[in-house]
Image: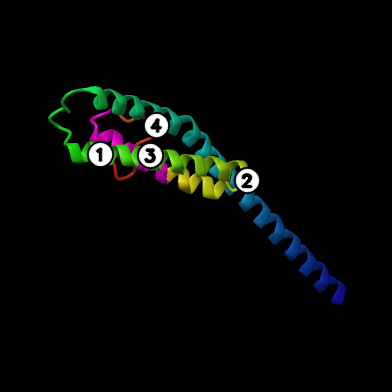
Amino acid sequence: MKKTIFSLAVILFVSSMMLISCSKAKETAELTAKWTILSAGVPKMVEAIQSRVDILSKSKKLPASITAEKFTEVKSVLAAVKEDWNKAQESFKAGKINDAVAVGTAAKDKIVKAMETLGMTVPAGMKSENSTK
């Protein structure tokens, strides 16, 4: 009887460890998939908005839909996103996938809002959940 109870306890323990391991593997796979999407999209969006900012900075007059304050804000957001994206990449390289995805997602959401402010088209699959366009 004691051996049976002990065997059942061992089986339950091993089973719970296997479930935890499977759950972590699934979570890691989901985070890696999110990171793959972010790492494919965010750098391109940063490049696109940097190009637009460069063009607008050289023009004599901003489009009517963009105030000087909004443009200054977009430039600040762009600089912050570049820093955030570097942090996200460092986290990913260090194996901190959860941190990388969290910081990368925040950076993506900021750059999406900046693109919308400038009247740019946000790539499919990159719009934030709170996006208006």
| Tag nearer the camera, 4 or 2 | 4
Tell me if residue 92 is in the magenta stretch: no
Q: Amino acid at mark 1?
A: Thr
Check disc 1: other Cα within 10 Å, few if <14, some if 14-19, many if 20+.
few
Identify the mark nearer the N-term, 1 or 2. 1
Q: Is residue 95 left or right of residue 50?
A: right
Q: Earlier in the sequence, mark 4 or mark 2?
A: 4
Residue occupying image coordinates x 26% and y 41%? 73
User: Going by the image, does 8 lie left or right of 133?
Assistant: right
In this rendering, would 60 be left or right of 9? left
Residue that badge 1 annotates: 72
Whichever of callouts 2 and 3 sits on the residue coming sooner in the sequence is 3
| Real-space Cα separation, disc 4 to disc 2, in angstroms | 24 Å
Kindly state the secondary structure of the residue where label 1 is placed. Answer: helix
Q: Whole-percent x and y of residue 69? A: 20, 41
Give the secondary structure at mark 2: loop
Q: Earlier in the sequence, mark 1 or mark 4?
A: 4
Residue type at mark 4 is Val
- Circle 3 residue: 79
Q: Quarter of the image holding residue 17? A: bottom right
Q: From the image, state whether disc 4 or disc 3 is nearer to you.
A: 3
Residue receiving disc 2: 95
| Residue at numbered disc 4 | 46
The vertical placement of 25 against 65, above or below, is: below
Q: Nearer the viewer, mark 2 or mark 3?
A: 3
Mark 3 residue crowding within 10 angstroms, few (<14) / some (14–19) / many (20+): few
- Please determine whether, in this image, residue 81 is positioned above or below residue 59: below
- Amino acid type indicated by mark 3: Ala
Measure how far apart labels 2 and 3 are at the Cα level.
Answer: 25 Å
Q: Is residue 112 magenta?
A: yes
Q: Is residue 105 left or right of residue 70?
A: right
Looking at the figure, which quarter contains the C terminus? top left
